[in-house]
Amino acid sequence: MARHISANRLFELPPDVKILSSVEHPSHERIDLTVEFPPQEWICPKYGSRHCWIKDSGKTRTVRHLPAANRSVFISYKHRRYFCNDCHATYYESVDWISDQFLMTNALLADICLQLTDMVSIRDIVKRELVTPAIVNDVLNMISIGRPDTLPEVLCVDEFKGNAGVWNPETHRWDTNKFLCNLTDGNSGVLIDVLPVIKGEYLISYFKKFSLEERRKVKFFCCDMHSGFMYVAKECFPNALICIDLFHVVNRLNDAMDQIRRRTQHELNEQKSASSEENYKLLKHSAYILKTKETNKAKLWGIKQDERQERLDQILESFPDISEMYDRLQEFLVIIDEKSYVIQRMEFGNWLNRTASSEVPEIRSASATLRHWRGYIQNGWKYDHSSDYCPYCTPFIRLKPVSTGYGLYKYSFLSETSTRSVSSIIIVPLPIFLSILSAFIPIRAAFSRAVR
């Protein structure tokens, strides 16, 4: 036997709501519903008194609702006003299935928030919910991502480029920062928090909001060779061992290689001879082949391996400074692959002694940097902890300040389009969004139970 489906179920409205009229717009793009529902028991928000009565039926209020049949739905109702006999004040009625912050129902608000957890663009959400981009942005700005309650045993800290900032009350402007800071759990790879400032004093004030007992639980502090991070680790985490990520160590040696290559090219450019022009062209666009690991050439170069190897041999034969830096870089990459920490530490010491006596200033400078942070670099080898997860998290987040305060941030996918574009991807990491979902899932569940 066929089951009758009421209009309330079709439009996902509570059963006590009575639909008075349903009008389809001439453009066939929206449906206008006029509804009424019984008055709710009103409690004075100021004194908590129940001595309230309906003053008048109020003005007609129109709110958005979930789309139906690929049409946007607008609900109109009389927004009643109540009068309190105790405080002699007038208040508007608060409806449990309509949002107090937005002109929409809680069901539509919950759907928009749930879709923000997916890797979709604002434009996609606009098409699904038939709302404007401004509405989705307002909902996103409403979401507050607070500070985490606990700290992981392995805390990874890294910086990345962004466009966020801190509100300056003196100038009434945002002080934008070129680099931001992300915090990651080194064991699970979960993004913990993103901070708009990378300065040491800001990080210290942030971490000291956690109790000393909680900060003592951090056993390893993984970071790059930034001295500010070292100071933060020593100041805030008394039990943590500092581990420098090998990515930043190898990157320092690659920078030394680039410095030598650019210096050599500049010297060749000043000579202005036929041989210097040939050598200049030989070095041009050679950064990739000079930094490739010996054991990875076949995998990375592919069918161009013989051609690139021949060019590399010519470069190493023609430029002794580049040849020496290439040998030192390859030696360090071999040390990294060593399985035994004892042999690794011994070979690293010998490598530092060889590079310290080099006649190439760029090699000596890189050697001095690694010697300065030698203990922390070896901690990363010994305990096998690094901030490897941070580079995987940073390409997927960009922080944007909003006018409501420090705790509200907008995460958008880094793309060629402007971050202010409505088509930019919005991502809120799922572990951080769980607290937000817990606030909206009961609303959506209550709606489903009411409709049934």
Image: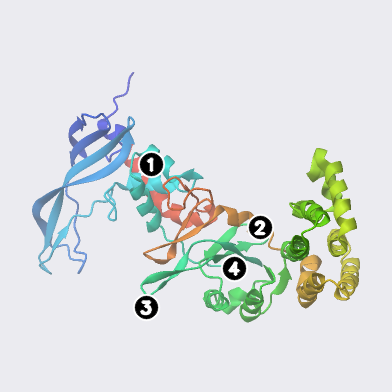
Hey, what amino acid is under mark 2?
A: Tyr
Residues at discs 4 and 3 in contact (Cβ within 8 Å): no
Marking on residue 126: 1
Can residue 155 be seen here? yes
Q: Residues within 10 Å of mark 1 (few under 14, many from 20)?
A: some
Look at the image and tell me in which quarter the N terminus lies: top left
Ranked by sequence position, the earlier of labels 4 and 1 is 1
- Indicate which disc, 4 or 3, sits on the residue closer to the N terminus: 4
Mark seen at residue 170: 3
How far apart are the two marked residues, 4 and 1, measured between alpha carbons?
A: 37 Å
Identified at 91% across, 67% down, the residue is 343
Q: Which residue is mark 2?
A: 389
Residue 265 in the image: state x and y as whole percent: 76, 60
**Which quarter of the picture shows residue 372?**
bottom right
Count residues near mark 3 (Cα–Cα under 10 Å), then give few for <14, some for 14-19, many for 20+.
few
For marks 4 and 3, give the CA distance. 33 Å
Mark 2 is surrounded, within 10 Å at the Cα level, by few (under 14), some (14 to 19) or many (20 or more) other residues, namely: many
Quadrant location of the C terminus?
A: top left
Q: Secondary structure at mark 2?
A: helix
State how many labels appear: 4
Amino acid identity at mark 4: Leu
* Real-space Cα separation, disc 2 to disc 1, in angstroms: 32 Å
Q: Which disc, if any, is residue 151? A: 4
Of helix, strand and loop, which one carries label 3? loop
Q: Position of residue 22 (x, y in %)?
A: 20, 32
